Amino acid sequence: MVKFSAFGAFALISLASQALAQRTVKVMPFGASIVSKCWRANLQAKLKNDGIRNFDFVGSLGGNCGGNGVDQDHEGHSGSQATDYAKNGNLTVWLDRNPPDVVIMLLGTNDVLLGKKPVKDILAAYDVLLGQMRAKNARMQIIFSNLLPLDPARWPKEGVEGMKALNSAIATYAPKKSTVQSPVYFVDNYADFNAVTDTTDGEHPNDVGSEKMAKKFFGPTKNAIQVVGRSSRILKSKRTTGWARREVAAKAANGGA
Ligand SMILES: *[C@@H]1O[C@H](CO)[C@@H](O)[C@H](O)[C@H]1NC(C)=O
């Protein structure tokens, strides 16, 4: 009798695990126009090719990236700046509307190019944005990209050099912000990216550039999706175990069932 109940509890736990292995993980691509480009489609294809299907890209904007079953949703707003987002609270609104488990962030190009903001102001804005993400979800998985290079033939020297300066600050900033509960995965999209041959206009990725970015984002995104899936599975099976234990105890008190 007891043996049978124990087996029942075990079966329940493994059923719960199987169901939760499929939990849909919400992924929000967040930033400016570079985020609106179609590296997101390439990334989704790579995840699916690797057997990862339990994700849903979220955001208030759509797109028209080609390919079968591309999830177009994102928060890549053209021309936007981290410093403006921090000041205006835009991200909080978007997080409330489509609460994500994972944020893929590439943001800051326009702070340098358009806003001509100093590096320290941009880092302070990142602090505000990471704080908003964690206030919404204490376990937020944050995939933090540095910035793509700019073509020096098409952009002013201050922009080209500004990108390098911000990237070198991000290289020390991002790892410092990582915590066990809410990891920051640094992604180096600057390295190996050719602003002349991998862009449409010296700034935004073309097909070759999009594929390079997807390759860089793939590992951390896969990892983040698996971490979210695993943690919810552990929480759920703890609950199931507690429930099963009470059930067994109740049956024993009733003289077995
Ligand atoms: C961010 O919020 C401000 C203030 O509400 C608004 O004016 C601005 O258009 C928003 N930016 C974006 C990209 O939605």
Image: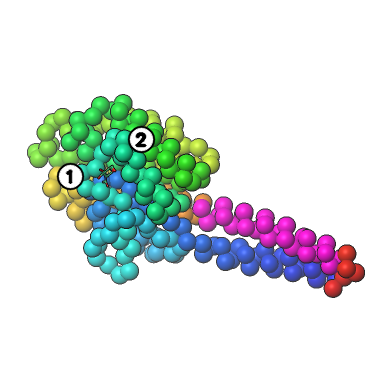
Up the image or down, 168 lies above or below 219; here it is above
- The local crowd at label 2, few if under 14, some if 14 to 19, many if 20 or more residues have their Cα within 10 Å, is many
Q: Residue 67 in the image: x percent, y percent?
A: 27, 67
Classify the position of ligand 1 by quadrant: top left, top right, bottom left or bottom right: top left
What amino acid does circle 1 point to? Glu
Residue beneath label 2, please? 126
What amino acid does circle 2 point to? Tyr
Residue beneath label 1, please? 203
Instruction: Check the picture and name the quadrant holding the C terminus.
Output: bottom right
Q: Is residue 141 left or right of residue 67?
A: right
Residue at the (78%, 64%) spot, across then down: 247
Label 1 residue SS:
loop
Find the magenta span and give its range.
228-252
Task: Return the disc, 2 or 1, that comes first in the chain's sequence.
Answer: 2
Q: Is residue 200 left or right of residue 88?
A: left
Q: Residue 187 in the image: x percent, y percent?
A: 36, 43
